[in-house]
Amino acid sequence: MYRVGRPGWRLAYRLGATLLYRVNVARDVEAGVYIATSPDVRGLVAEAATFDELFREVEAGADELIGSQLRARSGGVALLGAWGGSVPVPV
């Protein structure tokens, strides 16, 4: 397992490592929502009324953002599975 954002994470992924990332969750009591951000996945911000919904939002957002970062470097098409999924990236 290798954390997104660490030096060499793209190479580690291409070599078959499962990607991990940290997620910070806060509860906004006034708005009645959970808010998630990630120090590892640039641009990841999610908001939802329940923790289960938030988990799904984070999963979808992280998949898209990580896949985008992998495509940006490789120029290929990448599809990322949820939480340590698989992205076919040409080597």
Image (cartoon, helix red, strand yellow):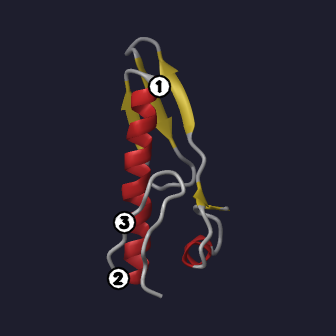
**Residue linked to disc 2:** 75
- The reply to whether dot 3 and dot 2 touch (C-beta < 8 Å) is no
Q: Quadrant of the N terminus?
A: bottom right
Q: Is residue 90 left or right of residue 6?
A: left
Label 2 element class: loop
x 32%, y 75%: residue: 77
Where residue 52 appears, as percent x and y from the top left, is 44, 28
Q: Is residue 41 above or below residue 86?
A: above
Label 1 Cα neighbours within 10 Å, binned few <14 / some 14-19 / many ≥20: some
Q: Residue furthest bottom?
A: 91
Q: Amino acid at mark 3?
A: Leu
User: Helix or strand or loop: what does disc 1 sit on?
Assistant: helix
- Give percent across and percent down for residue 31: 37, 16
Q: Nearer the viewer, residue 79 or 42?
A: 79
Mark earlier in primary sequence (1, 3): 1
Vertical arrangement, residue 2 with respect to residue 41, above or below? below
Vertical placement of 66 versus 14: above or below?
A: above
Q: Amino acid at mark 1?
A: Phe
User: In the rendered structure, are the residues bearing label 2 and label 1 in contact, judged by CB atoms less than 8 Å apart?
Assistant: no
Nearer to us in this view, 80 or 28: 80
- Disc sitting over residue 51 in the figure: 1
Q: Secondary structure at mark 3?
A: loop
Residue 79, label in figure: 3
Q: Is residue 43 visible?
A: no
Binning the other alpha carbons within 10 Å of mark 3 as few (below 14), some (14 to 19) or many (20 upward) gives: some
Q: Residue at x 51, y 51 (%)?
A: 83
Q: Residue at x 42, y 32 (%)?
A: 54
Q: What's under tag 2, amino acid-wise?
A: Gly
Q: CA distance from mark 1 to mark 3?
A: 25 Å
Q: Residue at x 43, y 45 (%)?
A: 59
Res 40 visible: yes
